[in-house]
Image: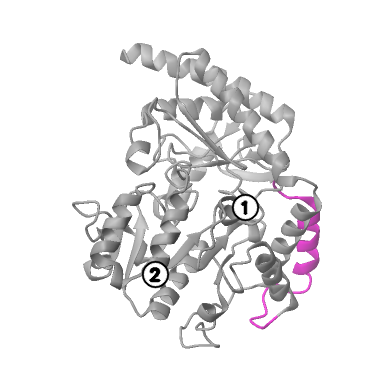
């Protein structure tokens, strides 16, 4: 069947009548790549199916949580049983304790855990807690790292690497942005300079240890250890935002992979098995400041709801039952990346291929990528051609050069071979684009 998006185009036009931009999260609009977003009808295993009848090998995985693949029968089976018992109680359940126990066992730095409904809630709550614990106001974040859409973190760098932040979105007051300092990821000297100037008033450094929101960026050797050492020396809390990397790059997340112990950790995605969820946690003496144990207020009617807890417990149990789960899924991801890289090299492209665990990314640049500035040097126009060529061949990637991609346990060798073959045809179109534009 020929690729078409006629029904999706009509659905998108209809959605715009009722929803800002026609979507409930901006990247879904395809504004970064152009064209019409497919409206998805269902998903199963490694596949998505849209309302036009197109089938896709999916490497978005709902932006990370579907590590077992879509609609895993054991997860959906347990969810079906849970639904029949009621969808929300607003009261304690054994499920909350069970998922919290699994999280603390996987992440020893998280002695106590509070469940919330999203990664944004988790990071917002962790920052409030850090400020209360340290009795300081300023926070440090890294350019290109995304931690949700609350005011303290929708901030861009000021005029220099060590200046205070300015709002990155209308509606964020200057007075709030002024408490946030932005530096480049992987630049330890810039971070040290910030601490020399503001160290006594920095409550927390929040970082994606493996950034996945400017494409996938890898920490340089010893970088995370040096960040940890700096924060410890100034009495600043180190917050690892592992919403994306938690249970993705290793069962115990990036902190297990790189041997770092943060003060607070934020999780999401995988721990909800595809349902809305988030969590934050850390050392007992910090977390006992959270209400009702302490004075730092945070609440949520649907926090720890039985459906998200059920899906999360089932997902983590299934992962733990598969011998060498992370070695196997990492090997599949490496094989895919190697195959796509070989196709690129066949056309003379020396693009940058990054992978850690089951996360991966291709940057359309021949220069090393190690921070937001270097990521932005990528040829977005070339990526957009590649993206649409892959989509037309039934391969669904994130609709932006600056997003990570995700492997699942459900992807097969045949899926990988088909994706590599499709990439060869897509790179041919990129080569044609370069010839026409005399690159």
Looking at the rendered structure, the secondary structure element under dot 2 is loop
Residue 87: within the magenta? yes
Task: Say which residue appears at 39% left-offset and 17% top-offset.
Answer: 433
Magenta span covers which residues?
A: 69-92
Circle nearer the N terminus (2, 1): 1
Give residue 356's position: percent from left, percent from top.
57, 41
User: SS class of the residue under badge 1?
Assistant: loop
| 354 w.r.t. 341: above or below | below
**Left or right: 144 in relation to 328:** left
Residue that mark 1 sits on: 65
Which residue shows up at 54% across the image and 83% down it? Answer: 288
Task: From this view, report whether residue 342 is shown above or below residue 295.
Answer: above
Q: Quadrant of residue 237?
A: bottom left
Q: Which residue is mark 2?
A: 236
Quadrant containing the N terminus in the rendered view: top right
Residue at (56% x, 43% y) in the render: 39
Q: Note whether residue 211 is visible.
A: yes
């Amino acid at each position: 069947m020929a690729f078409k998006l006629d029904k999706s185009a009509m659905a998108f036009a209809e959605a715009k009548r009722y929803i800002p931009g026609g979507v409930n999260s901006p990247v879904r609009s395809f504004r970064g790549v152009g064209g019409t977003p497919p409206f998805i009808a269902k998903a199963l295993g490694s596949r998505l199916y849209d309302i036009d009848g197109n089938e896709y090998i999916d490497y978005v995985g709902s932006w990370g949580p579907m590590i077992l693949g879509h609609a895993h029968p054991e997860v959906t089976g347990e969810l079906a049983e849970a639904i029949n018992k009621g969808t929300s109680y607003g009261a304690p359940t054994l499920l909350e304790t069970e998922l919290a126990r699994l999280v603390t066992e996987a992440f020893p730095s998280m002695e106590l855990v509070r469940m919330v409904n999203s990664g944004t809630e988790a990071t917002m709550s962790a920052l409030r807690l850090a400020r209360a614990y340290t009795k300081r106001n300023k926070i440090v974040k890294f350019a290109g790292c995304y931690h949700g859409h609350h005011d303290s973190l929708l901030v861009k760098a000021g005029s220099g690497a060590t200046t205070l932040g300015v709002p990155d979105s209308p509606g964020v007051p200057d007075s709030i942005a002024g408490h946030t300092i932005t530096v480049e990821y992987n630049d330890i000297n810039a971070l040290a300079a910030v601490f020399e100037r503001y160290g006594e008033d920095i409550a927390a450094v929040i970082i994606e240890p493996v950034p996945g929101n400017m494409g996938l960026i890898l920490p340089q050797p010893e970088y995370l250890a040096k960040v940890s050492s700096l924060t410890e020396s100034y009495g600043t809390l180190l917050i690892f935002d592992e919403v994306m990397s938690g249970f993705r790059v290793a069962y115990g997340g990036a902190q297990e992979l790189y041997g770092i112990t943060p003060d607070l950790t934020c999780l999401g995605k995988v721990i909800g098995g595809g349902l809305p969820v988030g969590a934050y946690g850390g050392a007992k003496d910090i977390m006992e400041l959270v209400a009702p144990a302490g004075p730092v207020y945070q609440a949520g009617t649907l926090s720890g709801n039985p459906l998200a807890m059920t899906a999360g417990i089932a997902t983590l149990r299934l992962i733990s039952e598969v011998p060498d789960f992370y070695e196997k899924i990492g090997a599949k991801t490496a094989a895919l990346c190697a195959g796509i890289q070989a196709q690129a090299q066949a056309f003379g492209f020396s693009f940058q291929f990054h992978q850690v665990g089951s996360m991966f990314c291709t940057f359309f640049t021949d220069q090393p990528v190690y921070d937001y500035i270097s990521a932005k040097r990528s040829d977005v126009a070339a990526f957009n051609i590649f993206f649409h060529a892959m989509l037309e061949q039934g391969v669904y990637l994130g609709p932006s050069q600056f997003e990570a991609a995700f492997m699942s346990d459900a992807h097969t060798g045949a899926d990988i071979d088909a994706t590599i073959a499709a990439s060869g045809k897509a790179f041919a179109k990129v080569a044609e684009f370069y010839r026409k534009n005399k690159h």
